Image (cartoon, grey):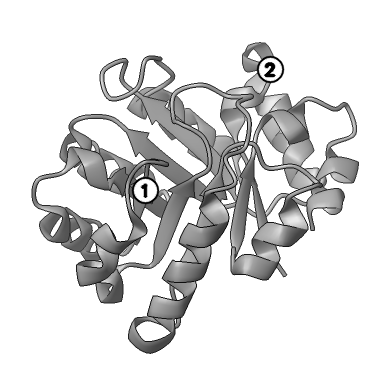
Amino acid sequence: MVKIAPSLLASDFTNIEAEIKRIEAAGADILHLDVMDGHFVPNLTFGIPIIKQIKNICSIPLDVHLMVTNPEDYIEDLAKIGVEYICIHQETVFHLHRQISVIKDFGIKAGVALNPATAIETIFPIIEQLDFVLIMSVNPGFGGQKFLPLVYDKIKKLQEYATTKNTNIEIEIDGGVNNTNAKLLEEAGADILVAGSYVFGNSNYKNQINSLK
């Protein structure tokens, strides 16, 4: 069954601990954390100190999405905190293979994130090294954006290529996910669905998560 990863970016930041406990109780599989630096994307969110506090109160795996120009500066600190997933953007890293190796050496699941305009074929040379790929179905930086259907073709291409290269790779989709496109995404080959506004925008988190599953 597909895993659901609510994005904390869409939660009530005045009561983060309660929000985390509510999505855990509602059946969330993973907590997705968007780290933005105001450079790679036109927005700022939270950094290492906040993630450390979140780890102390969260019982489900943390999936850290580094939307930053210098992801290599975050990896060791995130490893010390004990996060379970880290993905870095292919568009920001000169030596992608090296940084993925650093993440994996810490025992963390390593992934690459791709913007909508970045071809999926650009990560094929390192696909055997990856634990997951995060395909952006919106342009990163803000929540609540409209889903871009071009993602379906990317999923299928990645799924087909991974069949002979890395059958254990997980495909994660982030942006505009709802109960209308969730089934189509899973049928295309998605394993993890990130949903922010769709989950946190309704008072019944359990109903929202179940509708995606």
How far apart in space, not on screen, are marks 1 and 2 (Cα)? 25 Å
Give the residue displayed 51% in from the left and 60% down from the top: 153
* Number of the front mark, 1 or 2: 1
Answer whether residue 84 is visible to the viewer in this image: no
Q: Nearer the viewer, residue 136 or 73?
A: 136
Give the residue displayed 32% in from the left and 42% down from the top: 78
Which quadrant holds residue 69?
Answer: top left
Tell me the residue that label 2 is attached to: 12
Q: Considering only vertical position in the picture, is 18 above or below 122?
A: above
Coordinates of residue 71 in the picture (x, y in percent): 22, 38
Residue flagged by tag 1: what amino acid is it?
A: Ala
Coordinates of residue 116 in the picture (x, y in percent): 42, 42
State if disc 2 and disc 1 touch (CB < 8 Å): no
Which quadrant holds residue 143?
Answer: top right
SS of the residue under disc 2 = loop
Which quadrant holds residue 84?
Answer: bottom left
Q: Quadrant of the N terminus?
A: bottom right
| Name of the residue lying farthest toward the top | 14
Q: Nearer the viewer, residue 80 or 181?
A: 181
Tell me the residue that label 1 is attached to: 113
Give the residue displayed 22% in from the left and 58% down from the top: 100
State left or right for residue 49 relative to residue 170.
Answer: left
Label 2: how many Cα within 10 Å (few below 14, some 14–19, many 20+): some
Q: Nearer the viewer, residue 107 or 98?
A: 98
Q: Earlier in the sequence, mark 1 or mark 2?
A: 2
